[in-house]
Image (cartoon, helix red, strand yellow):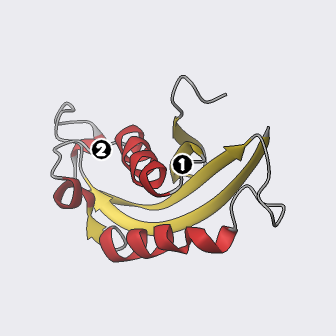
């Protein structure tokens, strides 16, 4: 199995409304997010790629236009847009356009990551 990944970054705010009032994430705050998209294939295409990295520029445009310097609660229409729910959202967006998408990871801080990988992706 061949796997490739590409990293994207954006800055945005959110708040997690379903947490206790004294939890710091219940307050409005922001992150410098990192999103990693993983694609996989059993066979390479005619050019020797899983997919040409340049084709992933559509995701960069989506992130820049929709998420960068925005309030994620408003973008997703959610009271609690966690890194986990962002990973699922980005996975579904990518999978619709890039069938080789096998996982998406989202980081809010240098020490934390959330990943969505469907059960059938190894």
User: Which of the 4 image quadrants contains residue 6?
Assistant: bottom right
Q: Which residue is at the front of the view, 31 or 77?
A: 77
Circle 2 crowding by C-alpha within 10 Å: few under 14, some 14–19, many from 20: some
Circle 1 crowding by C-alpha within 10 Å: few under 14, some 14–19, many from 20: few
Q: Say the numbered circle drawn on residue 86.
A: none
Counting residues from the start of the chain, the first of labels 2 and 1 encountered is: 2
The residue under the point 35% across, 65% down is: 12
Q: Is 55 drawn above or below residue 6 in the view shown?
A: below
The residue under the point 56% across, 65% down is: 8
Position of the N terminus by quadrant? top right
Can residue 102 be seen from the camera position used here? yes
Marks 2 and 1 sit apart, C-alpha to C-alpha, by 34 Å
Residue 19, given in percent of the width and then of the height, sits at 21, 32
The residue under the point 80% across, 63% down is: 46
Kindly check if marks 2 and 1 are in contact, taking CB atoms under 8 A apart as contact. Answer: no
Position of the C terminus by quadrant? top right
Q: Which residue is mark 2?
A: 25
Q: Which residue is mark 1?
A: 99
Q: Is residue 13 left or right of residue 9?
A: left
Query: Residue extending furthest front?
Result: 46
Across the whole image, how many numbered discs are drawn on residues? 2
Q: Is 8 drawn above or below residue 80 in the view shown?
A: below
Q: Disc 1 on helix, strand or loop? A: loop
Query: Residue extending furthest top?
Result: 119
Residue 100, given in percent of the width and then of the height, sits at 60, 47
Residue 56, given in percent of the width and then of the height, sits at 57, 68
Q: Is residue 37 left or right of residue 61?
A: right
Q: Which residue is at the front of the view, 40 or 10?
A: 40
User: Which of the 4 image quadrants contains residue 113?
Assistant: top right
Q: Is 50 drawn above or below residue 59 in the view shown?
A: above
Q: Disc 2 on helix, strand or loop? A: helix
Residue 7, given in percent of the width and then of the height, sits at 62, 62
């Amino acid at each position: 199995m061949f796997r490739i990944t590409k990293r994207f970054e954006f800055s945005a705010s959110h708040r997690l409304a379903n947490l206790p009032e004294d939890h710091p994430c219940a307050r409005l705050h922001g992150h410098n997010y990192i999103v990693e998209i993983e694609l996989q294939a059993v066979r390479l295409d005619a050019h020797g790629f899983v997919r040409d990295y340049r084709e992933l520029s559509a995701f960069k445009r989506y992130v820049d236009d929709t998420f960068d310097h925005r309030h994620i609660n408003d973008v997703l229409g959610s009271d609690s847009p966690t890194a986990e729910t962002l990973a699922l959202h980005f996975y579904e967006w990518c999978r619709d356009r890039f069938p080789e998408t096998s996982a998406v990871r989202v980081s809010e801080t240098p020490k934390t990551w959330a990943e969505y990988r469907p059960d059938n992706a190894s």
